[in-house]
Image (tube, grey):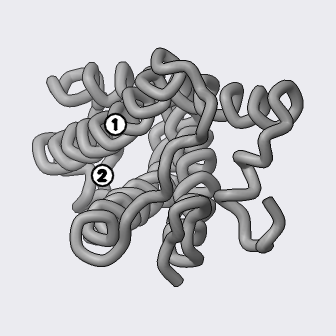
Amino acid sequence: MKSTATRYGTVAIMIHWLSAIFIFALMGSGFRAGSLADSAAKASVLSVHVPLGIIILLLTLTRVAWWLFVDRKPLHAEGDPALQTASAKAVHLLFYIVIFGVAASGIGMMVLSGVGAILFGGLDAPLPDLWDYGPRIPHGIGARVMAALLILHIGAALYHHFIKKDGLIARMWFSSAK
């Protein structure tokens, strides 16, 4: 269940891959909702988007608690240049900052706009224009920053796998292979 010096444990791996799946679904639903003009269609997409956001927030809080109180992360890959190691740390830290920021702005939009009551409280009303609420801007910026971070993260993983061939991806998978 716990990590070793060279690979992540089962709990960390599960949180990572569940987060990845839910983040992709969350971003897809968020960008889709943002492109819709029809209130009913947007409400339908947001009724999936909002719970996904809550799941990501809870998974991220669980991950932070796991690292703070239960487990330790494996050592960084040996042989990587200092700039590459610093970049990896920065991207991972930015993931946390962006996830918490996007979650906070999403919650802010829900509270200020009353969308929660429309989506989940049985209030029969059209959705308000979410662009009228201040948290909408950081929410959209955060989603785009998240997309950029995902590109960097996946690109780095593919670089390690196909170019360096150092087995780094295996550290975050369920098998015992290196």
Q: Are marks 1 and 2 in contact (CB under 8 Å)?
A: no
The residue at the point 33 percent across, 71 percent down is: 66
Residue 99 higher or lower than 150, as above or below: below
Residue 26 higher or lower than 165, as above or below: below
Residue 50: x %, y % from top left: 39, 55
According to the picture, the residue beneath numbered tag 1 turns out to be 93
Mark nearer the viewer, 1 or 2: 1
Who is closer to the viewer here, 148 or 114?
148
- Crowd tier of the residue under label 2, counting other residues whose Cα lies within 10 Å: few below 14, some 14–19, many 20 or above: few
Who is closer to the viewer here, 46 or 128?
46
The residue at the point 38 percent across, 27 percent down is: 90
Q: Is residue 119 visible?
A: no
Residue 74: x %, y % from top left: 49, 57
Q: Quadrant of residue 35?
A: top right
According to the picture, the residue beneath numbered tag 2 turns out to be 125
Kindly state the secondary structure of the residue where label 2 is placed. Answer: loop
The residue at the point 51 percent across, 76 percent down is: 11
> Most extreme residue toward the bottom, as rendered?
1
Q: Amino acid at mark 1?
A: Leu
Kindly state the secondary structure of the residue where label 1 is placed. Answer: helix
Who is closer to the viewer here, 117 or 87?
87
Residue 26: x %, y % from top left: 53, 48
N-terminal-most mark, 1 or 2: 1
Who is closer to the viewer here, 50 or 36?
50
Question: In the displayed structure, does residue 66 sit left or right of residue 164?
Answer: left
Residue 149: x %, y % from top left: 51, 27
Question: In the displayed structure, does residue 62 sit left or right of residue 162?
Answer: left
Question: In the displayed structure, does residue 108 sit left or right of residue 39?
Answer: left
Q: Quadrant of the C terminus?
A: bottom right
